[in-house]
């Protein structure tokens, strides 16, 4: 399944969008359930924060944290099939935009960045550029939560995340890692 997305990604931005839309059409990522760790992290760090979630998919996480008293929640995803579902969340704090992470330029301050299982779909240079942009735009005192599946395979991405600032929390088992990074 992921291999198919990989093939389309090599065809550039249109291929990338097509590939991920196809995944969502097949129901592959309408995952619904979130891990207890991720929910707990958003509860712990999300209060009174302006949240940006990159690679938000169909809003599975967004939907499960409506009880957290965050002030706003912007979700960004390349697949319009996914953001259309996410946009059904009926809460004025939420907005969703179809955009690739590479083309995302923050247009306002935010305090909490969430990237759940998506950073490593970008190449090395694009990951660096995105992280630099995101951390530069984050408000002072800002925090970022990353989850990385297959931590052994994604070692370079994990190293890249660790370089962004002090790690305030790290949890999860060997396969799936969660890193909470503070803005310096
Ligand atoms: C493995 S899924 C994870 C979805 C969701 N974060 C989760 O944990 O269930 C990867 C997500 O990243 C999105 N994505 C992949 N490449 C992207 C890109 N270049 N820009 C924006 N979103 C992207 C996909 O559309 C998909 O929703």
Image (cartoon, helix red, strand yellow):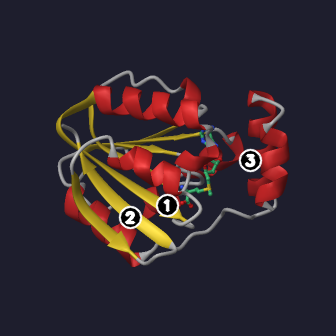
Local crowd size for mark 1, using a 10 Å CA cut-off: few (<14), some (14–19), many (≥20): many
How far apart marks 1 and 3 lie (CA) works out to: 18 Å
- The one nearer the camera, 132 or 116, is 132
Residue at left 42%, top 44%? 160
Mark 3 CB near ligand 1 (8 Å cut): yes
Is disc 2 in contact with disc 1, using a CB cutoff of under 8 Å? yes
Quadrant in the picture for the C terminus: top left
- Residue 10 location, quadrant: top right
Q: Which residue is mark 2?
A: 178
Q: Nearer the viewer, residue 84 or 2?
A: 2
Q: Which residue is mark 1?
A: 148
Q: Which mark is residue 20?
A: 3
> Looking at the image, which residue is at 50% across and 49% down?
157
**Other residues around mark 3 within 10 Å, as few (<14) / some (14–19) / many (≥20):** many
Label 2 element class: strand
Mark 3 vs 2, N-terminal side: 3
Secondary structure beneath label 3: helix
Q: Is residue 139 above or below residue 173?
A: above
Question: In this orientation, does residue 89 appear?
Answer: no
- Residue 172 position (above or below residue 91): below
The mark nearer the N terminus, 2 or 1, is 1
The residues bearing labels 3 and 2 have C-alpha atoms spaced at a distance of: 24 Å
Residue 67 vs residue 124: left or right? Answer: left
Q: x and y percent of residue 149 in the render?
A: 54, 65
Left or right: residue 74 versus residue 12 is left
Whether disc 2's CB lies below 8 Å from ligand 1 is answered: no
**Looking at the picture, how far across and down is residue 75, in whole percent?**
47, 43
Relative to the observer, which residue lies in front, 129 or 61?
Answer: 129
The picture places residue 76, in percent across and down from the top left corner, at 52, 39
């Amino acid at each position: 399944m992921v291999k198919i997305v990989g093939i389309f990604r090599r065809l550039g931005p249109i291929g990338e969008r097509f590939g991920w839309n196809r995944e969502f059409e097949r129901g592959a990522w309408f995952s619904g359930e979130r891990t207890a760790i991720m929910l707990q992290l958003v509860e712990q760090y999300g209060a009174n924060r302006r949240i940006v979630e990159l690679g938000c998919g169909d809003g599975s996480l967004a939907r499960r944290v409506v009880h957290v008293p965050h002030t706003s929640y912007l979700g960004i995803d390349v697949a319009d099939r996914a953001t259309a579902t996410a946009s059904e969340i009926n809460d004025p704090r939420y907005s969703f935009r179809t955009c690739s992470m590479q083309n995302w330029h923050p247009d306002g301050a935010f305090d909490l960045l969430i990237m759940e299982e998506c950073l490593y779909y970008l190449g090395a240079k694009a990951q660096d550029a995105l992280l630099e942009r995101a951390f530069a735009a984050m408000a002072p005192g800002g925090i970022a939560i990353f989850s990385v599946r297959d931590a052994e395979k994604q070692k370079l991405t994990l190293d890249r995340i660790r370089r962004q600032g002090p790690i305030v929390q790290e949890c999860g088992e060997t396969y799936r890692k969660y890193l909470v990074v503070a803005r310096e």
